[in-house]
Image (spheres, helix red, strand yellow):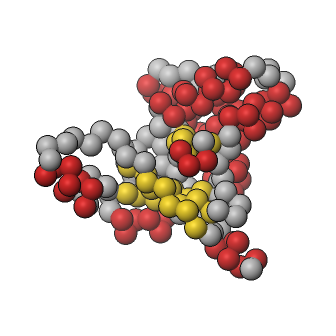
Amino acid sequence: MTSETPSTPADNADLIGFAKHDHASCVETGLATAQARCEAEGLRLTPVRRKVLEMLLQEHRALGAYAILDRLRDEGFGSQPPVAYRALDFLVENGFAHKIERLNAFVACAHPGGSHSPAFMICRKCDAVAEAYSAPAKGALGAAARAVGFEIERTVVEAEGICPDCIEKR
């Protein structure tokens, strides 16, 4: 994982969550980046928010709110759904996490703080998720929107397939 904002699609090689990497460092760096940004911007990374972010960083796969709630309860943070949803809302609003619409679940952002339009590759076998750079407003969708005077504010790009690990296991 990287905290840099990709500038071109060629940078995707650095962003793909399916790549082998030092996972402990990945989690540590993600938490440190979030903490530093919260301090710099006057945001509160409460213990619950931090724990939810840590859970998402540890997985590299989408987690549903109730799975997160179960883990929070096991960690002693409470068992009411608003506990998980408030933490997830904060993380998504501030760019530390993304909602994967297809799965109605959440994943840690591969490059928090960067202004970007992510595209997600979702493994249909194991639900692993990789985040890549996307520029839909510059491509065919953007051209179609401009042609009819539509201003794109948000896009969700999700591709379903099979990750390298599941391909190897076949």
Q: Is residue 23 left or right of residue 19?
A: right
Which quadrant of the view contains residue 130?
Answer: bottom right
**Residue 25 can be seen in this image:** no
Left or right: 72, with 100 as reference point: right
Total numbered badges shown on the rendered structure: 0
Determine the image quadrant of residue 84.
Answer: top right
Left or right of residue 69: residue 129: left
Q: Of 41 and 134, which appears nearest the observer?
A: 134
Query: Foreground residue, 54 or 29?
Result: 54
Q: Is residue 141 visible?
A: yes
Image spot of residue 104 (x, y percent): 60, 42
Across and down, in percent, residue 67 comes to 75, 38
Image quarter hosting the N terminus: bottom right
Work out which quarter of the rendered image holds the C terminus and state it. Answer: bottom right
Q: Where residue 81 appears, x then y in whole percent?
A: 71, 23
Residue at the image position 68 percent from the left and 44 percent from the top? 63
Query: Residue 123 location in percent, x, y?
Result: 63, 63
**Residue plotted at (80% across, 35% down):** 71
Residue at left offset 40%, top offset 58%: 133
Pick whichever, 52 or 85, lies toward us: 85
